[in-house]
Image: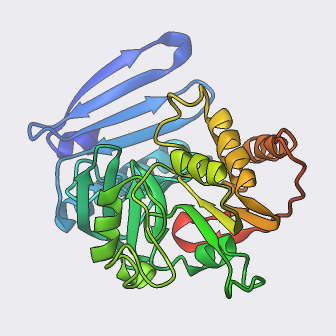
Amino acid sequence: QPIFQEQGMTETVHNWEDHGYLATYIKKNGSFANLRIHPHGLVLVDLQNYNDHTKGREEADQLLNKVEERMKELFHGNIKRVKRLPAILRGGVIDRYWPTADGRLVEYDIDEVVYDEDSPFQNIKILHSKQFGNILILSGDVNLAESDLAYTQAIMGSGKEDYTGKEVLILGGGDGASNIDQMVIDGCKKYMRKTCGDVLDNLKGECYQVLIEDCIPVLKRYAKEGRMFDYVINDLTAVPISTSPEEDSTWEFLRLILDLSMKVLKQDGKYFTQGNCINLTDALTLYEEQLSRLYCPVEFSKETVCVPSYMELYP
């Protein structure tokens, strides 16, 4: 209590008998601290203040240092473990916190908002990271950074394929392929050039064409025309923008993409796709189960790569 009183903070205590107690300390400038003590011995201290400069963070650290030292004195050095977490900065102009696919919160070294627009389909952000360069983020999902050559190499077969003279259909891939969202292409064309080069400057070249369409009607049209490809590369987002009106669930949507892709793939053709975070074992198993439910038998293999900006392994 004396430590917080020195800061001009007033105390209110809530006691729940068998469930421990909570003490709150409030300062006139709106800063406050919560001290929550649980019966089994866990003590949580949460300090919040509105301050966006280094001096404010230093003052908060000094206060927490005093609290930690006093706790050690009160418990006569019998504290098993003390863990201090870095400050989470809320409401800033630059959002540095993005979840991994398996739900862990990661703080990126974002220092600039390069592009931030809402399209009819999704929110599109391109943020600059000191480590990873520009990062494309679609509706909160980290898609690709300038550092992520490993992702591109893996989804193209890790250098084992010869694409000379072959016909390739790429689904998704807003940084340079068939895509439903023109605004993704516009953003990438201007701000992700280290990834897509000049391919998006013209949507049609000597040996390629970029289609601004939903891939499902495109696949159905090609299947009806009897057009066949040597390779189909699925670079759609992990979670589809919409599964309606085609299907009722994400899994049925993914199976629809797989079935349609098989119909336009040559007998000896190959289909490449991303998986998911290696920690999502149930989801990966479910995906593999979909492969046994296709209209035609398929063989598959997989490899795991580290995608830098994902900060996780991806099969």
Q: In the rendered image of this protein, does residue 59 appear above or below residue 309?
A: above
| Residue 298 picture location, percent across and down | 88, 54
Estimate the x, y position of residue 188 in percent, counting from the top left. 34, 70
**Which residue is most to the left?**
28
- Residue drawn where x is 33% and y is 21% of the image: 13
> Residue shown at 34%/27% (left/top)?
23
Q: Residue at image x 35%, y 65%?
A: 185
Answer yes or no: is residue 89 visible. yes
| Residue 9, image quadrant | top left
Q: Quadrant of the C terminus?
A: bottom right
* Along the viewing direction, whichever of 298 and 307 lies nearer the viewer: 298
* Residue 235 image-quadrant placement: bottom right
Please give left or right for residue 217 compared with residue 227 in the image: left
Q: Position of residue 71 (x, y in %)?
A: 46, 45
Q: Tell me if 87 is positioned left or right of 25 in this view.
A: right
x and y percent of residue 129 in the render? 37, 74
Residue 154 vertical position relative to residue 224 in the rendered view, above or below: below
| Residue 127 visible, this angle | no
Q: Residue furthest front?
A: 225
Classify 129 as above or below 164.
Answer: above
**Residue at the location (68% across, 79% down)?**
166
